[in-house]
Image (cartoon, grey):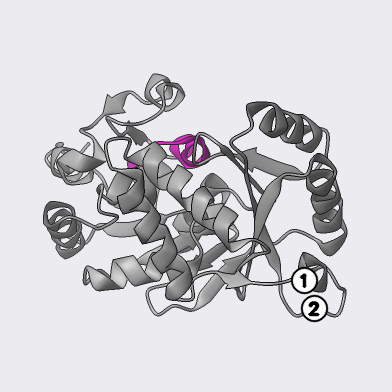
Amino acid sequence: MITCIVTDMDGTLLNEKQEISEANRQAILDAQQRGVEVIVATGRSYEEARYVIKEAGISCDIICANGAEVRNKEGEVIYQAGIEIAKAKEIAAVLNETGIYFELYTDQGTYTENEEMGIELIVDIFTTANPNVSKEQVRQAAKERFEKGHIKLVDDYGILFEESSAERIYKFLVFSFDERQLGEAHTKLNALPGIAISSSGKENIEVNSLDAQKGVALKKLLDDKGLSPENAMAMGDNLNDLSMMKVVGRPIAMGNAMEQIKEFCPFITATNREDGVAKAIHEALQQPAT
C-alpha cells in the first residue's frame, strides 16, 4: 500500500507550459484526501518551486535544490545540507579554470553573474524536458524567471564565498553548449572528494554536498514522518532523480525520461505532456494492500 508519493517537477509534474495540469493537480489532492503523504522533490530553489505549487492550490513538503533544503507545508526549513565555504571555493576555482558558466543556489536565493547565460541555462532545462516546445516560448518563460526575482544578478560570486557571508551555499548549476568544455568540467569535478554530481538537462551539471541529494533528504523526511520507504513511490525523468528512486519501493520513470532512468525503474508511466504523474498515482492507489 502506497503511503507516500514523491514527484520531481521539471519534466515530471510540470507539463510543456511549465504548469501543473488539472489532472495532475486533482490526482495529488485525491491522494492527500486518502491520507497519502505527497512530497515534491526538485532541483529548483524553494521560491521557484513554491510559486508553481501554490498557484495550483497544492500544499505539501518540498525538497529543494536537489535535497540541500527541505521545507514543510508552512514553508519552514526543517533540513539543510550546504557546501562548506572552503569546498565551494574549490569548486568555483575548478569551474573558473575551465571558463564555464555557473549559477549559485543559496539559502537566500539563486545568483548569476551573467543574465543572458542564465536564460540559456533555463532554456536548456525546459527544452530537455519538453523537446517539442519552441525555444522562443521557453525563452519567454526563462525571462520571467528574472522578472519575478527568482534569480539575482551579482557582479562577483566572491562576496558569497566570504567567511562573513550569512548565506549558505546549496548548489552549483553548471552550463555549457560546448560538449568538450562540459566534459572537462565534469572530469575535474569528479576528482574533488565530498561532492555529489548529477544533471537535470543535456548541457548542465549540478553539484551539491554529498548530504544534499534527493534520496538522502527523502530518507530523512520519511524517517521523521514514520513512513516506510518500501511503501513510497517516486517519479522522475533525469539523473538528479536517481538517488530518490533508489530509496523507494516503487520507482517510476516518466515516458519522457532518460534511458538510464527507464532502465533502472520497473515502472514507466506516460510523459509529462500526457499527465503521467496523474496516471501513475491512480495506478498506484489501486494496488491492493499487502
The crowding category of the residue bearing disc 1, from other C-alpha atoms within 10 Å (few below 14, some 14 to 19, many at least 20), is many
Query: For the residue marked with disc 1, what is the amino acid?
Result: Leu
Residues rendered magenta in the picture: 231-247
Instruction: Assess whether residue 22 is covered by the magenta stretch.
Output: no
Query: For the residue marked with disc 2, what is the amino acid?
Result: Ser
Residue 18's place in the image compared with 146, above or below, is above
Q: Which mark is residue 160?
A: 1
Quadrant where the image shows the C terminus: top left
Instruction: Assess whether residue 243 is covered by the magenta stretch.
Output: yes
In the image shown, does 17 or 254 lie closer to the viewer?
17
Quadrant where the image shows the N terminus: top left
Is residue 205 in view from this perspective? yes
Q: Residue 77 location, x and y as percent? A: 54, 74
In the image shown, does 87 or 98 lie closer to the viewer?
98
- The residue that mark 2 highlights is 165
Label 2, label 1: how many angstroms apart (C-alpha)?
A: 6 Å
Give me the residue at 76% from left, 30% from top.
184
Report if the CB atoms under discs 2 and 1 are less than 8 Å apart. Answer: yes
Q: Residue 108 location, x and y as percent? A: 61, 76
Q: Which mark is residue 13?
A: none
Give me the residue at 23% from left, 32% from top.
269
Residue 215's place in the image compared with 227, above or below, is above
